[in-house]
Amino acid sequence: GNSVTQMEGPVTLSEEAFLTINCTYTATGYPSLFWYVQYPGEGLQLLLKATKADDKGSNKGFEATYRKETTSFHLEKGSVQVSDSAVYFCALEMDSSYKLIFGSGTRLLVRP
Amino acid sequence: SAVISQKPSRDICQRGTSLTIQCQVDSQVTMMFWYRQQPGQSLTLIATANQGSEATYESGFVIDKFPISRPNLTFSTLTVSNMSPEDSSIYLCSVEDRKGSRADGYGYTFGSGTRLTVV
């Protein structure tokens, strides 16, 4: 079946460090891919998305590129801030399914 | 994007009782979704709620345990019935953000969640 695998956390970085959170997927077709962020005590917010191969989603300095050949959608940011501390979820949606399949989430802790 | 108000934000309940969670959206939406996030785990879709029809439940979830109402296009409730400690989770509602075209890839907006503890 369709699934999403994320690197386990927590990931602890110093401010201004480079961030990569790995995400790979298994899907029978061509899904849309998403990154969601959950700040402490809040609901999920859409961070970025990509709908087809080689698309790059970007928002708030975060980027992720839809790589069909490696079935990956890794999240990157060049310089993290303390305010980026949150849990990040990678997710996929198959065509017209209206059903998001989430990875297990990766907790990021950024220290000053 | 849509703004979702979900309540209660948290509750502690006795086993065997039921809790109803409310989700209010500031715009009309066709479909609303209910998710469960068990402690330390990811989100799992419970059901999809369409106005004017029965909710569609995912494998492993049944209407008797999680009855859903959808009386209009801006409101839905999820009830967690006959609760046990295993029902302790965060429950979230979600709607689709219909901006642009489907080809652009709709996103989904989530409520802030209801943290349920069953004792």
Image: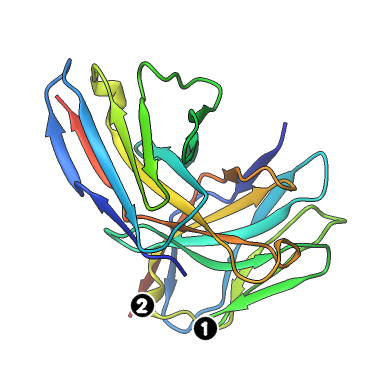
Q: Position of residue B92 (x, y in %)?
A: 37, 45
* Mark pair 2, 1: CA separation: 10 Å
Seen at 48% across and 53% down, the residue is: B95
Q: Residues within 10 Å of mark 2 (few under 14, many from 20)?
A: some
**Number of numbered discs visible in the structure rendering:** 2
List x then y, in percent, for residue A74. 66, 63
Closer-to-camera residue (B52/A28): B52
Question: What's the mark number on residue A15?
Answer: none
> What's the chain of the residue with tag 2?
A
Vertical placement of B83 versus B79: above or below?
A: above
In-front residue for pair B74/B22: B74
Give the image quarter of residue B102: bottom right
Q: Which mark is residue A79?
A: 1
Q: Is residue A15 above or below residue B103?
A: below
Where does label 2 land, which residue?
A: A82
Rendered view: B67 above or below A39: above
* Residue type (three-letter) at the residue carrying disc 2: Val
Q: Position of residue A36 (x, y in %)?
A: 51, 60
